[in-house]
Image: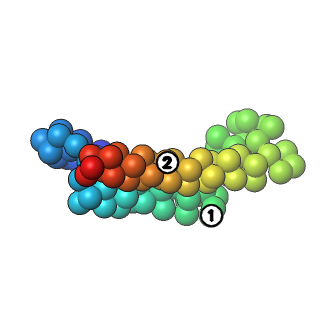
């Protein structure tokens, strides 16, 4: 993912602006990051059980569920923000 993101930035630099193909690649890369994060968090596989055990407050009540929800929402918002930003910039550049 990191190498692909660097490649996208190089391609954007060489193009001098956001283009629609670059927007599509950006959206795919954003999803390629967020989908595994959301899936791993939703199935309680992202956080190491030793980490949860070490932080006692994390195991109490609904705290782990709250942290999971916050991380999932944050990942989704990051994808939406990054994609929307590139779409807006491509639209402006096309004018």
Q: How far from the left and from the top, in percent, is residue 4?
A: 25, 50
Label 2: element kind: helix
Q: Specify whether 30 is left or right of 55.
A: left
**Residue nearest the observer in this picture, 94 or 23:** 94
Q: Is residue 86 visible?
A: no
Q: How far from the left and from the top, in percent, is residue 75?
A: 54, 50
| Residue at figure coordinates x 17%, y 40% from the top left | 16
**Residue nearest the observer in this picture, 47 or 35:** 35
- Dot 1, crowdedness within 10 Å: few (<14), some or many (≥20)? few
| Residue at figure coordinates x 84%, y 45% from the top left | 60
Residue that carries the numbered disc 2 in the rendered image: 81
Q: Is residue 60 visible?
A: yes
Label 1: element kind: loop
Q: Nearer the viewer, mark 1 or mark 2?
A: 2
Q: How far from the left and from the top, in percent, is residue 87?
A: 37, 53
Residue that carries the numbered disc 1 in the rendered image: 43
| Residue at figure coordinates x 50%, y 53% from the top left | 80
Mark 1 touches mark 2? (CB < 8 Å):
no
- Dot 2, crowdedness within 10 Å: few (<14), some or many (≥20)? few
Q: How far from the left and from the top, in percent, is residue 14?
A: 12, 41
């Amino acid at each position: 993912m990191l190498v692909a993101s660097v490649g996208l930035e190089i391609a954007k630099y060489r193009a001098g602006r956001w283009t629609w193909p670059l927007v599509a690649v950006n959206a795919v890369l954003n999803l390629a990051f967020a989908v595994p994060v959301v899936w791993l968090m939703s199935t309680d596989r992202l956080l190491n059980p030793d980490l949860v055990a070490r932080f006692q407050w994390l195991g109490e009540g609904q705290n782990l569920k709250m942290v999971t929800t916050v991380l999932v929402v944050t990942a989704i918002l990051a994808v939406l923000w990054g994609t929307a930003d590139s779409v807006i910039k491509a639209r402006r550049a096309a004018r």
